[in-house]
Image (spheres, grey):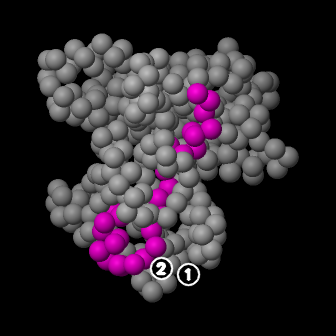
Amino acid sequence: MMLLVVNSGSSSVKLAAFEGTQQRAQAQVDRIGSGGPPDHAEALALGVAQLAVPARQIRAAAHRVVHGGAELTRTCRITPAIEQTIAACATLAPLHNPPALAGIAAVARLWPGLPQYAAFDTAFHASNPDVATTYALPAAERARGVRRYGFHGLSYAAIVRNMQHCYPNGVPKRLLSFHLGNGASSCAIVDGHSVASSMGFSPLDGLTMGTRPGGLDPAVVLDLVARHGLEQTAQMLNRGSGLKALGGSNDIRALHAARTPEAEFAIAHFCYWAARHGASLCAAMGGVDAITFTGGIGENDGICRSNILNHLAFLGAVMDGDANARGEKALHAATSRVAVWIVPADEERQIAIETAAAMSREGQT
Ligand code: AMP
């Protein structure tokens, strides 16, 4: 029996079929609504056909959901009430939660009655202490859930799991983890648990990203809203900022190739702010024992890794330049006080593992 893992983006659907922890097939359908399939339901049907897994073998579907709010802190079966909570969080994650809901609806239409589960990118950070998650705002705002949540949690949970292969006797105590892709964040992990994240109330905060600006003085947002209105500002902050705004492209490979001063500045900005947030997260852990890189940039871009680690050299992290250039797993030099690793992103398997655990809790296995 298979589990169908569904990762719905605004214009794409990624599917993976898992048998236990083994991925048996994967498929991706892009350009939903812009030349490809008209909607998520059609995209899902196309993707499932690509997977070539007989429908009768699919036991359940599990969706990646970016924002679970304060309540949804572990992978769970989707009920109408859970779906409503996910919908209520959609204003906080406008790029991500609406497509996940579209994916859930599409599966329900394709296979009525199929058990569906949701795995949340916020859940891994539920262990953050109050001091890390609280904004110093009036009590009424805090009471309605205005706080830091943190994201990319499925990726970080997978990193902790996969780091165990590098350290069979126990993962380093204080782990600074960078997820560097189109969305980018960093996480402080102590004894395998998240204690702080660079992302906050929404996935907009923290590092410079492909199309999001990262941290801003809230007065900038007030100024932008006064000038452009709420909707246009939201669009600007979610889709029109970051590397794209600074360098002309959200694709870091295009920025490296362009070699213009703007593109080089965008890369420098990305690395500088990754390091600044990373160093702040080290303060939350009282130091650092290991650093990991994951995501499209973290796994593949040796120039960015080296630039970020140069900024963090004061922590005692020394990179082996040759290992970095070759993209090896272990990047630390023999003299480094801090271990440095590339750990490939493994979010889909994490969803499969967490869903299997949720199913067995419910006696569904
Ligand atoms: P993600 O969101 O994790 O898919 O990452 C997207 C980012 O990773 C984009 O900026 C890509 O340019 C970058 N990326 C993907 N593959 C590579 C590669 N082989 N070398 C450098 N950057 C890459």
**Label 1 CA crowd tier, 10 Å (few <14, some 14–19, many 20+):** few
Give how far across and how far down residue 307 sits, in percent.
54, 23
Q: Are marks 1 and 2 in contact (CB under 8 Å)?
A: yes
Front residue of 282/84: it is 84
Which of the two discs, 1 and 2, labels the residue nearer the N terminus? Answer: 1
Mark carried by residue 330: none
Q: Report the span colored magenta.
A: 103-130
Location of residue 61 by image quarter: bottom left
User: Is residue 105 located in the magenta-colored stretch of the structure?
Assistant: yes
In the picture, measured across the screen, residue 7 lies left or right of residue 314, that is left
User: Is residue 99 located in the magenta-colored stretch of the structure?
Assistant: no
Please tell me whether mark 1 sits on a helix, a strand or a loop.
loop
Vertically, is 358 above or below 269? below
Give how far across and how far down residue 267 sits, in percent.
41, 25
Q: Which residue is mark 2?
A: 58
Q: Is mark 1 within 8 Å of ligand 1?
A: no
Q: Which residue is mark 1?
A: 1
Vertically, is 348 above or below 178? below
Q: Is residue 78 visible?
A: yes
- Residue sitting farthest toward the left: 228
Front residue of 257/123: it is 123
**Three-letter code, disc 2:** Ile
Image quadrant holding the N terminus, namely bottom right
Please tell me whether mark 2 sits on a helix, a strand or a loop.
strand
**Three-letter code, disc 1:** Met
**Cα distance in 3D space between marks 1 and 2:** 6 Å
Q: Residue at x 71, y 46 (%)?
A: 163
In the picture, measured across the screen, residue 330 lies left or right of residue 2, that is right
Q: Residue at x 68, y 51 (%)?
A: 161
Q: Is residue 348 visible?
A: no
